[in-house]
Image (cartoon, rainbow, N blue to C red):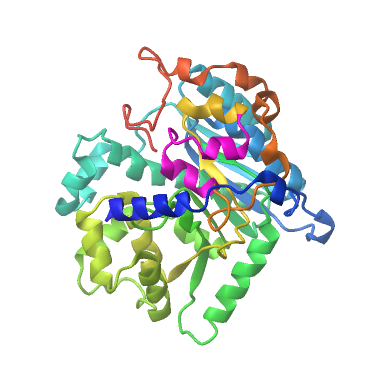
Amino acid sequence: MFLIIYFTLYFLLLYSQPVSPNKHSGNVSSRIDLSKVPKSFRVAIITAGSLRSFGYAARSWQRYILRPWKSHVYVFAHVVYDKNCIIDEKGLRLLREFATEIEVSYQITLVPNTYLDCMIPEVFVQKMFAGGKSSVQRGNVIDMLQRRNRAYQLSQMYAKSRNISFDFIVFIRPDSAIYHPAMDFLSWHNHLQNIVNQSSLHSPNRRGAIYVPGSCNFGGICDRFAAGLPADMDTYFKSGWILEVMRWALNSKPNKYQELDEKVAKSHFQNTGHKEVRDIVHNLLYAGSFSERLHLCWFLMNNISQIDYTPGHYPLAFVTLRNHFANFYCESNRSTFLTNEEVDFADRFPGFTYNHASVIGGFDEVASAPERCGALHTLNASAACGITSNCVCTDGRKKGVDF
């Protein structure tokens, strides 16, 4: 099933190569008119995981998130840091420049094995620990989700201690390099608020909605980016929800959760090609893309729809930046980077234009390493990822670190 989805997206990509920057530059403004944004409007940016290539992506965060929104944005991070890795050291230094709160973790695992021994249902043990208890699934799923919860809790404690609240919550991975235009959080907030209000008007249960780009859906719901209202993101970041999904999947008549909303379920069936809930549960148990399938089940259980962007009018473009391609990203414009077939297709796809991302514009046309990545471009990321290096490179699987 994964291969079918993968190659379907690949052929779509072949027929939707990035259009010429000259045709679209300036069509979408990267500036946000703050005069139209309520002074009390607050956005919490949640990021968690290995620092990896963050240092190379940091300037894109400043360009498309921090500068356009100034005092409206607060950044909360839980990051895995290796003091012996120069890439981590420089990335953490840059993150400290604008993060509101940071929790630094020096350990690879986060959730104790003794806890997992008691909590993981037997049918999932092999799936979770096929490579041992420090395997990729353990790091890519269990610890990954718990780290995200820790970062989210930083935002909640910060808000409580200052008697404030956040109007909008956004999750972004630290290795996300963002392209044009600036993220329009207020428009997203208003759109989602309207969807929730209208869809819940004649329903006994609240129907939630979270923005998740379908361009990085593989087997389930993309786990690389999410933006939503506080009520839904509180569910999204809930501690230990993976265990709730496992118990739900093994119970043919779950009674702990509200009844599955017919319209919400139908929306997920349309997005995934499934016909019934049992198909989703079956794939969770036996198919790949485990994290994405877990997210699909969690959305379904809580009556939350995945709201994708209107085809051809995407307001967002980003890539998942691995260290081996960090320097190439720095020295490339958007088109050049996205057409490099050596970069994993799944990592490039959310940055493609036409139907699957925002159109090319503004700074996307610039191919300047100093301007795109700052002084860090002089550090050769590939060289730092040598055999004897302590740096987490490629996808982090050698150490079992999340993603």
> Quick check: is 341 in the magenta stretch?
yes
What main secondary structure does the magenta stretch of the protein show?
helix
Report whether 223 appears left or right of 351: left
Q: What residue do we see at 74% from left, 49% from top?
A: 30
- Please say whether residue 65 is visible from this viewpoint: no
**Where is the C terminus found, in terms of image quarters?**
top left
Q: Residue furthest top?
A: 388
Count all numbered tags in the image, as a single digit: 0
Q: Name the spot of residue 111 as percent of width and height, x first.
A: 33, 39
**Where is the N terminus found, in terms of image quarters?**
bottom left
Q: Nearer the viewer, residue 251 or 117?
A: 251
- Please say whether residue 234 is visible from this viewpoint: yes
Q: What residue do we see at 59% from left, 68% from top?
A: 192
Q: Name the spot of residue 295 as percent of width and height, x first.
A: 38, 57
Report whether 318 appears left or right of 403: right
| Whether residue 305 is situated above or below residue 219 in the rendered picture | below
> Quick check: is 158 in the magenta stretch?
no
Q: What residue do we see at 41% from left, 52% from top?
A: 11
**Start and end of the magenta stretch?**
332-351
Report whether 193 appears left or right of 396: right
| Whether residue 374 is situated above or below residue 84 in the rendered picture | below
| Whether residue 326 is situated above or below residue 362 in the rendered picture | above
Q: Nearer the viewer, residue 244 or 85?
A: 85
Q: Name the spot of residue 260 as percent of width and height, x first.
A: 35, 76
Q: Nearer the viewer, residue 352 or 201?
A: 352
Q: Residue furthest bottom?
A: 202
Q: What residue do we see at 60% from left, 52% from top?
A: 316
Q: Name the spot of residue 348 as percent of width and height, x first.
A: 49, 42
